[in-house]
Amino acid sequence: MNNTKIDKLEAIRGFCALYVVLFHLLPQKIFFLGINIGILFRFGSEAVIMFFILSGFVIKYSWEKATDKSFQNFFFKRLVRIYVPLLFIFLLAYGIKCYNEGSIADPEWGTLLGNLLMLQDVISLKPNVISSVYMGNGVLWSLSYEWWFYMLFMALIKNVSTSKINTWVNILTILAAITYLFYPFFLNRILMYFALWWIGVQFADIYLKGAKFSLKSMQSYAFVLMAIIILLGLNLYFNFNYTKTYQYPLVAYPIVELRNFVFAFIVMFGALIWNHFNWFGFNRFFGVFKYLAPISYVIYISHHYLVIQATYLDFIHNRVVECLLYIVVMFVFSYLLEVVVYTKIKNSLHNAVLKQPINN
C-alpha cells in the first residue's frame, strides 16, 4: 500500500480517536451564532464503527502481506497489540480508585476477569450483557468485539476456501441478525457486527486485487447489509418499549444497532463516491489527524480517566483551561505508553516468543 493510502487510513483513525474524546467531553448544546454546533459531536458510536471498518481493512491487508500465516503468529500479534496497553489502563484505573478511596480498593475481580476474557459490553445500554466494562470505562465494549472479530477472521480464513468465505460471512451475519430479533445476547451481537468489520475486509480485497473501487464492486455486499438493516428495523418495531428502559435511548438497544448499520452503509457508499472524486478535500480537512494515529489506541482507552473523569487540575477553576491541559496530559501519556513502552515490550516479547525478526 502506498503512503497516500496509508496516510488516509491513519488520518481517519486519528480523527476518530480524537472525536470520541470530544464526544464524551463536550456538552450536547454548544451555541455558535445562534446555531447548536454541539450536535456535530454526538456521533461517538459511529466513530467506533469507523474503527471496526478500518480494522477489517488493516487485518485483511496485513494477513495477505504476511510471510508467516500461522495461527501462532497471528494470535500473538493481536494479543500483544490489544492487551499490553490495556493492562496498563487497568492498572491506571485501579490506581485512581485507590487514590480516591485513600486505601487499598476493591479491584473488582469479577469484572476484571470478564474484561480479560473479552466478554464486556455496556450493561446500561444493551440487554443480556455478560460482563460490564471495567471501572466504568465505557469504550472498552468495542475491544471485546474487536478481539472476537480477529478470532472469527482466523477461523474462517483457515477453514473456509477463499471462494466461499464471503458466502459464509453472509450466512453467519444474517442468521445472527435473525436470532437477534428473538433473543439479543453477546454471541449473536458479535456475529451480527462482524458484517460491519467485513466491509473493511471487502475494501482490502478489492485493493489487493488491483480492482476498481466502484458501486458495482460492493453491490452484492450492500444487499447483505440491507437485509440486516431491515431485520434491525423490525427489531426496533417489535422491541420499541426498550427505548423507555434505557436512560439514553438513542445510543441504546434497539436503536443503536440500527444506527450503526445505517451509518456503515452510508460510509461504504460514501467512500466509493469520494474515491471516484479522488478524495477531493480529504487532506485539507483530515490530513493533520494522521499524526495522532500512532497513539490513537491509547487515546481511546485512556481518555475516560485522563480527561473525562479527571479532577487533579480542579484548582485552576477554569473548565476550558483544565480540559485543554487534560488533553495535553492524555497526548503525552499516550505517546509514552503506545510509542515508547508498548514498542519495547512488543519487540521483547516477539523475540522471546516467536524467535524471529519483527515483521509488522
Image (tube, helix red, strand yellow):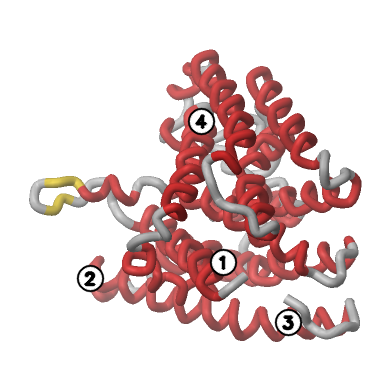
Q: Where 112 falls versus 254 (above or below)?
A: below
Q: Where 37 falls versus 185 (above or below)?
A: below
Q: Position of residue 8 (x, y in %)?
A: 49, 66
Measure the C-alpha gap from mark 3 to mark 2.
39 Å
Question: Three-letter amino acid code at disc 4?
Answer: Leu
For this orientation, the residue located farthest to the top is: 238
| Residue 297, numbered circle | 1
Q: Where 12 falls versus 85 (above or below)?
A: above
Measure the C-alpha gap from mark 1 to mark 4.
26 Å
Front position in the image: 307 or 224: 224
The residue that label 2 is drawn on is 317
Quarter of the image for the C terminus: give it: bottom right
Quarter of the image for the N terminus: give it: bottom right
Q: Classify 10 Å Cα crowding around label 4: few (below 14), some (14-19), many (20 and above).
A: many
Measure the C-alpha gap from mark 1 to mark 2.
30 Å
Front position in the image: 201 or 43: 201
